[in-house]
Image (cartoon, rainbow, N blue to C red):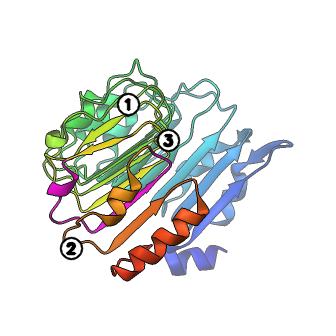
Amino acid sequence: MNRLCGEFGEKLEVRFFGHYGGHFDASVLTHIPKVSWLSVDCLMEIVNEQEIANLASLRRLSFGVNKFDKPGFLNQLDLGKLDRLVLVENVKRNLDLSPLQNARELETLFLNGFTKNIGVLAGLPKLKQLSLGGIAKTQSLRFVSDMSGLRSLTLVLGGRQSIDEIAHPGLEELNVLRVRGLEGLGSLARFPRLRELVVEDQIKIRSINVSESNLRKLILMNCKNLKEIQGLGNLGELIEFRTSQTRLDLDALLEGEWPPSLQVLALYSGSQKWNDAARETVNRRGYREFALR
């Protein structure tokens, strides 16, 4: 395994997970000193976790231990070497994030449940992708607006009534997934470079206004009270549109005028008969159901 780690580097993920009947002993990591991508997650307990800090080739780390109770753990790591980091919540959600100010090469970060000193993220110059999971509504997200290099933001779970406090001139992708209590997205003019918007599992959102955007990808799934998309006809560069389980007028969307740029059109109702007939119509119009990879 160590030889393979040396050969493939960040292309090879080595994962230790699911030790539910006991603890994971991280001393086993001494056998793979060349590992670049390590995942130690879905664990209840861990011992000898300091061995993670001794991995000189480590560039990507995923860490999630349910009963872990060492708030200063990040101080042990050489964060300046990492380009990808995933931190999954523990029971106490007490990990101190202040050491992340040293993660100057970090490009991708997923945080689930941790917020102590989260504001230091605003100072990370290379951070392009940020996912925030399970963030309480009492935690301000204003710091996101100051993350100059950010291009992709995902908000998943947690709760808040609005995200109006976030405005970013360089954000290109926004994903809002199952955020409890969210009533709307506000004006998309706050994100002048936004090209992809994904909204899923938002039962309180009734209307979305895209008239102040230039989206190329719009996905709206399981927003059961959504009945209006303002400005949809103004998206002259739209490439992909998908929707399911909303109150939108699907017949109007099926027969409506779309820009020449559109390639993917996927409309799903609760009726398989309607879906099958709609697919035939969409196919005749020259649109695909799925984007090409």
Q: Is residue 95 left or right of residue 205?
A: right
Q: Secondary structure at mark 2?
A: loop
| Number of numbered tags placed on the structure image | 3
| Three-letter amino acid code at the position of disc 3 | Asp
Q: Is residue 125 visible?
A: yes
Q: Quadrant of residue 146?
A: top left
Question: Which residue is depicted at the point 38% across and 30% down?
Answer: 98
Q: Check disc 1 and report its element: helix, strand or loop.
A: helix
- Per the model, the C-alpha gap separating discs 2 and 1 is 45 Å
Distance from the alpha carbon under mark 2 to that under mark 3: 27 Å
249 relative to 211 in the view: left or right = right
Residues under labels 1 and 3: Cα distance?
A: 32 Å
Q: Position of residue 125 (x, y in %)?
A: 22, 48
Residue 239 in the magenta stretch? The answer is yes
According to the image, label 3 marks what residue?
201
Instruction: Report if residue 82 is visible in the image.
Output: no
Residue in the picture at 48% in, 64% down = 57
Q: Residues within 10 Å of mark 2 (few under 14, many from 20)?
A: few
In the rendered image, which quarter contains the C terminus? bottom left
Identify residue for label 1. Answer: 98
Q: Is residue 239 left or right of residue 199?
A: left
Looking at the picture, which amino acid does disc 1 mark?
A: Ser
